C-alpha cells in the first residue's frame, strides 16, 4: 500500500502551460539575436577578407610600380590609361602569392601627370584603398 503525502500533488496543467509560455517568450528574442549576430559576423568576415585582398593588391602595386605610356603631339601630352594592364598584372601577382579572387579586382589609375606618382584606387568586393604609386613614363611614338 502506498502512502500519499499531503500537499505534494505536483504541477497542474495550467502551471506547466504558463511555465512553457514564459520560457518561449524569453527564448524567441535570444534566438533572433543569435541569428542576427551570425549574419553580422559573416558580413564582417567577408569585408575583412575583401580588405586583405585589396591591401595585398595595393602592396603589389607599390612594389612593382606602374608604367604609363604617353604620346606628345603638337605640345599636347596624351596618356594611355594603364588601368586594364595594371589590373591584369596585379591579379596575376596576387594569384602567385596564393590569393584567390572571388570578386572582380578593379584598379583605376587617374590624375596622370608627367614625372609624378600617380593616384591609384584599388577596389575589391566592398573594400576600397586609395594610394599613390610610383610611375615610370614611357613615350610612345606614333
Image (cartoon, rainbow, N blue to C red):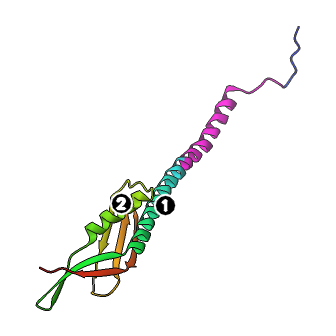
Residue 23: x %, y % from top left: 64, 39
Q: Quadrant of residue 74?
A: bottom left
Which residue is located at x 23 percent, y 74 percent? Answer: 81
Q: Of 47 and 130, which appears nearest the observer?
A: 130
Q: Which part of the image, by quadrant, shows the N terminus?
A: top right
Q: Which of the image's four quarters has the C terminus?
A: bottom left
The residues colored magenta run 8-34
- The residue under the point 61% across, 37% down is 21
Overall secondary structure of the magenta section:
helix
Q: Earlier in the sequence, mark 1 or mark 2?
A: 1
* Number of residues whose C-alpha sits closer than 10 Å to that of mark 1, classed few (under 14), some (14–19) or many (20 or more): some
| Label 2: which secondary element | helix
Whether residues under marks 1 and 2 lie with C-beta atoms below 8 angstroms apart, the answer is no
Q: Residue furthest front?
A: 141
| 27 over 3 or under it: above or below | below
Residue 60 lies, in percent from the top left, at 41, 68
Tell me the residue that label 2 is attached to.
92
Task: Please tell me whether residue 91 is drawn above or below residue 29 in the rendered image.
Answer: below
Element under disc 1 = helix
Lateral position of residue 30 relative to residue 45, left or right: right
Percent coordinates x, y for residue 118 in the rendering: 33, 81
Percent position of residue 67, x then y: 29, 76
Q: Label 1 belongs to which residue? A: 48
Amino acid at each position: 500500500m502506498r502512502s500519499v503525502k499531503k500537499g505534494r500533488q505536483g504541477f497542474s496543467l495550467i502551471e506547466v502551460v504558463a511555465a512553457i509560455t514564459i520560457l518561449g517568450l524569453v527564448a524567441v528574442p535570444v534566438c533572433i539575436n543569435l541569428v542576427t549576430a551570425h549574419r553580422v559576423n559573416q558580413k564582417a568576415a567577408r569585408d575583412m577578407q575583401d580588405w586583405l585582398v585589396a591591401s595585398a593588391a595595393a602592396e603589389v602595386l607599390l612594389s612593382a610600380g606602374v608604367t604609363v605610356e604617353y604620346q606628345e603631339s603638337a605640345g599636347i601630352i596624351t596618356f594611355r590609361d594603364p588601368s586594364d594592364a595594371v589590373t591584369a598584372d596585379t591579379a596575376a601577382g596576387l594569384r602567385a602569392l596564393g590569393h584567390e579572387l572571388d570578386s572582380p579586382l578593379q584598379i583605376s589609375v587617374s590624375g596622370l601627370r608627367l614625372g609624378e606618382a600617380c593616384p591609384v584606387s584599388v577596389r575589391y568586393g566592398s573594400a576600397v584603398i586609395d594610394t599613390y604609386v610610383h610611375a615610370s613614363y614611357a613615350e610612345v611614338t606614333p
